[in-house]
Image: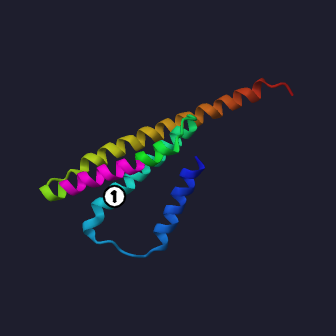
Amino acid sequence: MWIVIIGLILGIVIGLSFPEVLPVSFAHYLSIALLAALDSTFGGIRASLERRFVQLTFVSGLISNAVLAALLTYLGDKMGVQLYYAALFAFGYRIFQNLGSIRHLIIDRWARSRAKLRQTPL
């Protein structure tokens, strides 16, 4: 789980340290890349909390999500159809689904730890 958090923080720091401005034509690609990274990050955090985190799965998911989303965006641009909306919807849905699961897992762990504290005699 720490690798995911460290990678996210490192990516934010690197992104903020370069003041380069990207052309507006890359806005769709950047938004898709950001959502693919967030989707993989929240999926990795969820898997870690469920004790099912596998680094290979995380990395392959990140790469395949980014490649597929970029391909959809590129093909949509070439055809004049905004196909990136499909990726935006899918990633947005999965991000909120993972975030809800993360919240439930954290609350369940917290409730179990509180219950254990109440049961232990002083």
Between 91 and 62, the one nearer to me in the picture: 62
Left or right of 79: which side holds 7?
Answer: right
Whole-percent x and y of residue 27?
Answer: 29, 63
Instruction: Specify start and end residues of the magenta stretch as a single range.
Output: 62-75
Instruction: Tell whether position 77 is magenta.
Output: no
Whole-percent x and y of residue 39?
Answer: 42, 47
Instruction: Tell whether position 65 is magenta.
Output: yes
Looking at the rendered structure, the kind of residue marked 1 is Ser
Q: How is the image coloured?
A: rainbow
Quarter of image, res 23: bottom left
Q: Is 85 placed above or below 100 here?
A: below
Residue at screen point 58% across, 37% down? 106
Q: Which residue is farthest front? A: 56
Whole-percent x and y of residue 20?
Answer: 39, 76
Q: Main secondary structure of the magenta part?
A: helix
Left or right of 116: which side holds 93?
Answer: left
**Label 1, on which residue?**
31
Residue at screen point 24% across, 55% down? 73
Residue 86 in view in this figure: yes
Q: Is 93 placed above or below 17 here?
A: above
Q: Which residue is farthest left? A: 79
Q: Is 53 placed above or below 78 here?
A: above
Residue 39 in view in this figure: no
- Label 1 Cα crowd, 10 Å radius (few <14 / some 14-19 / many 20+): some
Task: Give the tally of numbered discs.
Answer: 1
Whole-percent x and y of residue 107?
Answer: 59, 34
Mark 1, secondary structure of its residue: helix
Residue at screen point 30% across, 45% down? 89
> In which quadrant will I find the C terminus?
top right
